[in-house]
Image (cartoon, grey):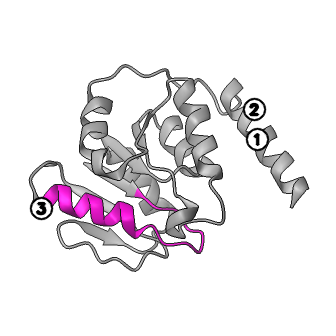
Amino acid sequence: MIFVITGTQKFEFNRLLRAMDELLANKEITDKVFAQTGYSTYIPQNYGYSQYLPMSEFEKYVSEASLIVCHSGGAAINTALKAGKIVVTVPRLQKFNEHVDDHQLEIAKKYGDSNYLEICYDIEKLSEHIEIAKNKEFAKLENSKSKIVDIIDKWLEEGERMC
């Protein structure tokens, strides 16, 4: 099962939800899919979804997933990696009004450079990135205070001080 996580901030991520729907409709993905859609307005036609999930249900979906497709938020990525899941991340982009800036590109790059996950920069190639991720050997996130987490925590703290 693929679990899609869009986050809970007040931004939609219709682009990702629509792409997953199209991949299922075109049979490019045959896995069962479930999504936590957050503030998105797109209604999936080919897979189950819930706008928000209680933490216990969210953790259940993470646990049952063989692969997680998520936005490039630190919490979503860390949750998936700590659970030992294969992760494909799709950064939210400012040009689509999915966030206030493109900081998710930087977060994705930090994790990608350490070989923790697969990054999909072009939503049209999501299916390819999912297949690559299924067949790729990734580094394991050893603990919650790994070097990459320290780097991202420091980067986020510096950003907050600048706001």
Mark 3 and mark 2: Cα distance apart in space: 40 Å
At x 46%, y 61%, the residue is: 6
Q: Residues within 10 Å of mark 2 (few under 14, many from 20)?
A: few
At x 70%, y 24%, the residue is: 147
In the picture, measured across the screen, residue 93 lies left or right of residue 40, that is right
Q: Earlier in the sequence, mark 1 or mark 3?
A: 3
Give the residue pinned by disc 2: 150
Disc number lying in front (3 or 2):
3
Q: Which residues are magenta?
A: 5-25
Residue 60 image point, x, y percent: 39, 54
Q: Residues within 10 Å of mark 1 (few under 14, many from 20)?
A: some
Residue 46 image point, x, y percent: 17, 67
Please name whichever residue, 85 or 123, is drawn nearer the observer in this view of the structure. 123
In the picture, measured across the screen, residue 90 lies left or right of residue 46, that is right
Give the residue pinned by disc 3: 25
At x 38%, y 47%, the residue is: 122
Q: Earlier in the sequence, mark 3 or mark 2?
A: 3
Query: Which amino acid is tagged 3?
Result: Ala
